[in-house]
Amino acid sequence: MTTLTVNIESEADLATLQQTLDKLGLHYDLSKDSEYEFTKHQIDGFVKTQQDFIEGKTTARDWRDIEKDLDSAFN
């Protein structure tokens, strides 16, 4: 078996290549290196957190402070 890795930037080229591979009867795996897509639930959570911050219901913490808490929890 031989594996071929190809970087394709054009959606039109991708569609053409997939059609060609299908016609040849070749098996292929497709993975897209795109930006992470958040679920609606995650986006709703981000919006709520932002709104809570704006309304003063929560405060922002410095990342170094968060790292200390994580270090003490896992070490």
Image (cartoon, rainbow, N blue to C red):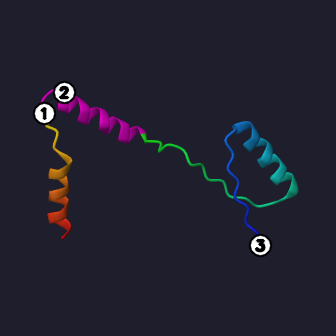
Which residue is drawn at the image coordinates 73% and 44% (left, top)? 14
Kind of element beneath mark 3 = loop
Q: Position of residue 56 (x, y in %)?
A: 12, 30
Which residue is under mark 1? 57
Q: Residues within 10 Å of mark 1 (few under 14, many from 20)?
A: few
- Is residue 10 placed above or below 67 in the rendered structure? above
Q: Amino acid at mark 1?
A: Lys
Q: CA distance from mark 3 to mark 2?
A: 57 Å
Residue 62 lies left or right of residue 18; in this view the side is left
Residue 41 lies left or right of residue 13; in this view the side is left
Q: Residues within 10 Å of mark 2 (few under 14, many from 20)?
A: few
Q: CA distance from mark 1 to mark 3?
A: 58 Å
Q: CA distance from mark 1 to mark 2?
A: 8 Å
Q: Position of residue 45 (x, y in %)?
A: 30, 39
Q: Earlier in the sequence, mark 1 or mark 3?
A: 3
Q: Earlier in the sequence, mark 3 or mark 2?
A: 3
Callouts 3 and 2 close, C-beta under 8 Å: no
Locate the N terminus by quadrant.
bottom right
Which residue is under mark 3? 1
Quarter occupied by residue 75: bottom left
Q: Amino acid at mark 2?
A: Ile
> Is 50 inside the magenta-drawn segment?
yes
Q: Position of residue 58 (x, y in %)?
A: 14, 37
Q: Position of residue 20 (x, y in %)?
A: 84, 49
Q: Residues within 10 Å of mark 3 (few under 14, many from 20)?
A: few
Which residue is under mark 2? 54
Which residue is drawn at the image coordinates 76% and 41% (left, top)? 13
Instruction: Give the residues drawn in magenta, as a range.
Output: 40-56
Residue 36 lies left or right of residue 71; in this view the side is right
Q: Residue furthest right?
A: 24
Q: Residue furthest front?
A: 64
